Amino acid sequence: MAPSHELVRHGYDRIAEAYLAERVRFDSQAHLERFAALLRPGARVLDIGCGAGVPADHVLVDRGFEVVGLDVSPRQIELARVQVPEATYAVRDMLELTVGEYAVAAVISLYAVFHVPRERHGGVLTTLASYVPRGGALLVTMGTSAWEGTADLCGAPMWWSHHDAETNEALIRAAGFDILSSVVDTSAGERHLVVLGRKVRETRQRPSKRGGRFSLNAATASAWSRLR
Ligand SMILES: C[S@@+](CC[C@H](N)C(=O)[O-])C[C@H]1O[C@@H](n2cnc3c(N)ncnc32)[C@H](O)[C@@H]1O
């Protein structure tokens, strides 16, 4: 496992409470309202990198949706089970998820995908796309500019890896989603790309080099080859 991966997991285990206290500075309410408006009553939603489940899972269960949250940090999952007891949680690494493993109406992932290496973002998005039917919604936070590195987060070293906004949007489309909105969120004085998408295409599946499976279609392959 890459050192950056361990740094992220241990980092969030260490700072889980402090991050939860800081989370109020980032305003996700409008994004969550737009996402929720796309869902049928009682829809099942998968939250990737759910953290302590606040605010996303809390808002979603409050509106009657069924939420399954996954996070690589055991401490974050402990907190989530306390914060949002109505949701179902599991400690999972998004890089270990396999195609078709979940069947949900929609996927949400706020401030999480950029904690895995950017060359894996396309694979993660195509795997997430395999969990929703055509018409299924995606709400995802990504980077606005290309950057990879370590910085302090709530007193612990943390690692991020992201592409620029244009590349992120290309990867989301290549995974099979139409982009309904793509906005730069500037809450807490930071800049993050928040994309709301709807799945419009199925993707074909192919074994990955790492032995797991992920979906790849022609558009994804073309976007990936441009990134290499
Ligand atoms: C900045 S927090 C965001 C938490 C929550 N989504 C929110 O909106 O507050 C990032 C979360 O992603 C999780 N994470 C990082 N890498 C992950 C991975 N490979 N698989 C699953 N979760 C991961 C972290 O443990 C952390 O809880």
Image (cartoon, rainbow, N blue to C red):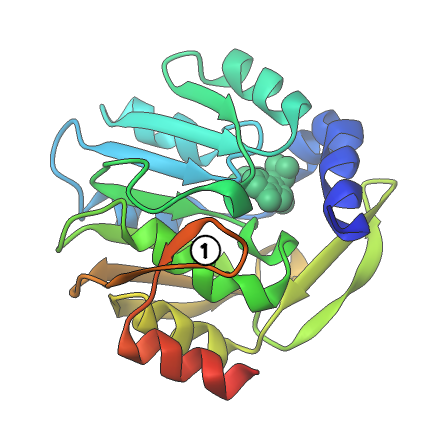
Does residue 193 appear to the left or right of 11 in the view shown? left
Please state the horizontal and vertical placement of residue 195, each as a whole percent of the image.
38, 63
Q: Report whether residue 166 is seen.
A: no
What residue is shown at x 62% (from left), y 54% (from top)?
116
Q: Report whether residue 209 is seen.
A: yes
Does residue 205 appear to the left or right of 47 in the view shown? left
Please state the horizontal and vertical placement of residue 49, each as a whole percent of the image.
53, 40
Kindly indicate the quadrant of the structure image that contains residue 197. Answer: bottom left
Please state the horizontal and vertical placement of residue 89, each as a whole percent of the image.
46, 21
Say which residue label 1 marks.
Answer: 124
Q: Is residue 30 above or below residue 75?
A: below
What residue is shown at x 54% (from left), y 83% (from top)?
227
Question: In which of the image's four quarters is ligand 1 placed?
Answer: top right
Q: Is residue 119 above or below residue 79?
A: below
What residue is shown at x 81% (from left), y 41% (from top)?
154
Does residue 31 appear to the left or right of 187 in the view shown? left
